[in-house]
Image (spheres, rainbow, N blue to C red):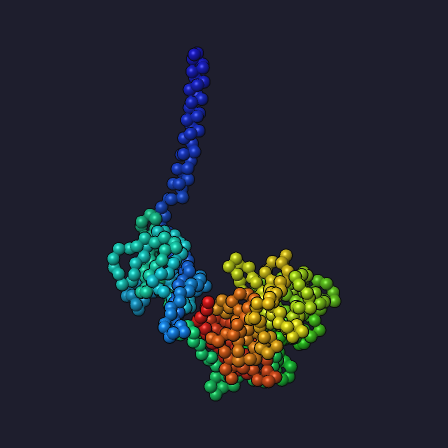
Amino acid sequence: MTISMKKALNILFALLALLLVWPLSSCKKDDEETTTPTSLCYISSFTLGTLTYYRTSTDESGEAVTTTYTYAGSYYPMAIDQIPRQQEMAPSLYAGTIYSTKPLLVGTDPTIVPVTIAGEGNFTYRPLNNEGAWITFTSGDNVDFSTPVVFRATATDGGSSRDYLVTITIRDNDPNGYTWEQMMPADGGTSLLAGRSERRAVAWKNGFAIVSIDGSNAFHLTTATGTTAPTWSDTPCTGADGAEVGSLQKSQGKLWMHTTSGALLRSADGVAWETVAQTDAGTTIQLLAASPNLLYATINGVMSCSEDGQAWTAVNLDDDESLFPFTNHAATYYTQSNGTARVILTGSCDETTATWYREEDEDEPWLLISRTGDNDYNLPWSSLLKEGSLVDYCSRIIAIGKSATTYYSTDNGVTWKEYTELTLGSGQQAADGEHIAATVAGEYIWIITGPRIWRARLNSYGE
């Protein structure tokens, strides 16, 4: 072998060795960059996982039976206060506090609470009343919250840490019990809704809003700000002449109504209303339902949807149009686990109850829930819900009308059963000639009949 060939082979071997070493050194460098210790230490989010709660009932023999249920803790947000404050339950000064913004269901087991944390640093925890060793935390771990818990975020460089006092609250009232609480008029007071007619309510901002008409045919917006101890206000509306109050909908952060002449009105504050210009001339609009993203209406008699109330897209019906309740109906929506809305609309057509739904997708039609021979759980629309409401509450669609009996569905409107855990007393029922309105705001169902406003809070998710 010549000297030149030996040199060539040496160069080739050196190149091969470099190729073998380069990926390893590159990966090592990447690892070093992603694990470089930092001085950051904080918790930015604290989320509860699937929670367990228990309900005790009596069977036919009189024996107590305990049934286990689960529900999503993510629907009960945890607030984080990053400002150091002195705590009565813990004399030490903590860098932050984390607490439930609303009470968990009665019977929730506080000893098995799965938790997911986001933030910076390494996380450990220990019970407030235990000065023992810190427990290493990994997102998804179950934590015992039967007593307050201290979570610590420690910087990866080990130079600093922050302690958070974490507490959860569990409601202590009977899960099957509720009390109708009269909110207006107050004892000895006068209702803001005295003399009003054709009222309708929707959840609105930090409370709810009611649009009504007084004896002079003037429109008013009555609002409750805050739902625990609401602050009430009543303001005359402008630009709402001719509106059909029963068509009031909320979408895109605005309020909407149609008029008796088929025009569409819009308001950003519920007080000042404006007519929405239509893309196509001669458009006659009848609002039927809404979700956070879309309005649903008949446009010149054709079922359609719109994002802005100006341009409308026809939406097909998967069955006979004569079965769609265009005039005598109630509607609501709820957000599914995948983040899309499902709109439920039910009403009467030729003395027959019909329930339709639509998945929030522009390519999806309205689907009729067929009535099979073995489904005996229809909604008695004509006797219950004329001038009534549907509300989404406690994982149920609840039908509320002039009857003392309410109904609920846990399967998207396929079957309806009497809601024995929620009945209307004489005070909550509407008198002859009165309209009834219902909405959900905060943790409460609100009923508006005549000049009276009532609320009740349920705590039962049922089967």
Residue, far bottom: 188
Image x and y of residue 293, in percent: 59, 62
Question: Residue at 61% of width from left, 79% of height from top?
Answer: 198
- In the image shown, does 239 or 76 lie closer to the viewer? 76
- In the image shown, does 236 or 259 lie closer to the viewer? 259
Q: In the rendered image, which quarter is residue 247 located in?
A: bottom right
Residue, far top: 2
Residue 368 vs 3, above or below: the answer is below
Image x and y of residue 426, in percent: 51, 84
Residue 273 vs 36, above or below: the answer is below
- In the image shown, does 86 or 109 lie closer to the viewer? 109
Q: Quadrant of the N terminus?
A: top left
- Seen in the image, is 139 located left or right of residue 369? left
Q: In the rendered image, which quarter is residue 104 located in?
A: bottom left
- Seen in the image, is 361 located left or right of residue 65? right
- In the image shown, does 168 or 463 lie closer to the viewer? 463
Question: Residue at 58% of width from left, 75% of height from top?
Answer: 380
Question: Residue at 40% of width from left, 44% of height from top?
Answer: 34
Q: How many marks?
A: 0
- Seen in the image, is 225 located left or right of residue 143? right
Residue, far right: 282
Image x and y of residue 375, in percent: 57, 68
- Seen in the image, is 455 located left or right of residue 42? right
Mark yes or no: residue 383 visible: yes
Image x and y of residue 242, in percent: 67, 76
Mark yes or no: residue 192 visible: no
Q: In the rendered image, which quarter is residue 281 located in?
A: bottom right
Question: Residue at 65% of width from left, 75% of height from top?
Answer: 351
